């Protein structure tokens, strides 16, 4: 099944006088919740939905807990989560302190299963 996309006209934020260009943007098919995933997983295995849900809730709890302790969380073919930061530059190494860090975020790097799924995608223009 092809992923739908629509067309958006977007200007250059660095040059307001530049002509706008048109870009393809994917259209969401909706959302899948943690509960939906638990139900789907339980139907594809011998594990009941409540047990799958307990494991998924534990995963949701453990990922940020381990990231906050400085770990990279690797989830096999799914990918990995790690801490990323943005910081202000200093002239010397001695001038760098924790105060230089102004942004914290979680970075996700997709694993081979997701890379393959993305590589195999096809697209069609939304009407």
Image (cartoon, rainbow, N blue to C red):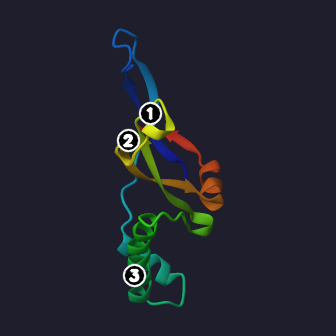
Q: Secondary structure at mark 1?
A: loop
CA–CA distance in space, label 2 to label 1: 7 Å
Q: Residue at x 39, y 19 (%)?
A: 12
In the rendered image, residue 124, in percent from the top left (x then y), is placed at 52, 40
Front-most of residues 90 and 42? 90
Question: Dot 2 corresponds to which residue?
Answer: 100
**Quarter occupied by residue 74:** bottom right
2 or 1: tag closer to the N-terminus: 1
Q: Quadrant of the C terminus?
A: top left
Marks 1 and 3, how far apart in space? Answer: 44 Å
Which residue appears at 42% of the width and 42% of the height? 86
Q: In front here: 78 or 74? A: 74
Mark 2 and 1 residues: CB-CB less than 8 Å, in contact?
yes
Residue 45 located left or right of residue 116: left
Circle 3: element type: helix
Q: Position of residue 21 (x, y in %)?
A: 43, 19
Q: Is 63 situated left or right of 121 in this image?
A: left
Q: Residue furthest top?
A: 17
Q: Is residue 124 left or right of residue 96?
A: right
Q: Residue at label 1?
A: 89
**Circle 1 residues within 10 Å: few <14, some 14–19, many ≥20:** few
Please identify the quarter of the rendering in which residue 100 is found.
top left
> What is the CA distance from the residue labelled 3 to the residue labelled 2?
40 Å
Task: Please identify, in this view, whether the residue under mark 1 or under mark 3 is nearer the observer.
Answer: 1
Q: Position of residue 47 (x, y in %)?
A: 49, 89
Q: Is residue 34 above or below residue 88?
A: below
| Image point (64%, 49%), residue name | 119
In the picture shown, does residue 60 fall above or below 95? below
């Amino acid at each position: 099944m092809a992923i739908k996309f629509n067309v958006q006209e977007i200007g250059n934020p660095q040059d307001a006088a530049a002509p706008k260009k048109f870009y393809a943007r994917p259209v969401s098919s909706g959302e899948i919740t943690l509960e939906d995933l638990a139900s789907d997983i339980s139907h594809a295995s011998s594990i009941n939905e409540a047990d799958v849900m307990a494991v998924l809730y534990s995963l949701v709890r453990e990922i940020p807990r381990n990231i906050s302790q400085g770990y990279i969380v690797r989830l096999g073919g799914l990918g990995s989560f790690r801490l990323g930061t943005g910081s202000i530059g200093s002239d010397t190494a001695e001038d760098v302190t924790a105060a230089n860090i102004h942004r914290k975020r979680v970075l996700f790097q997709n694993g081979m299963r997701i890379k393959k799924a993305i590589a195999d995608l096809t697209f069609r223009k939304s009407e």
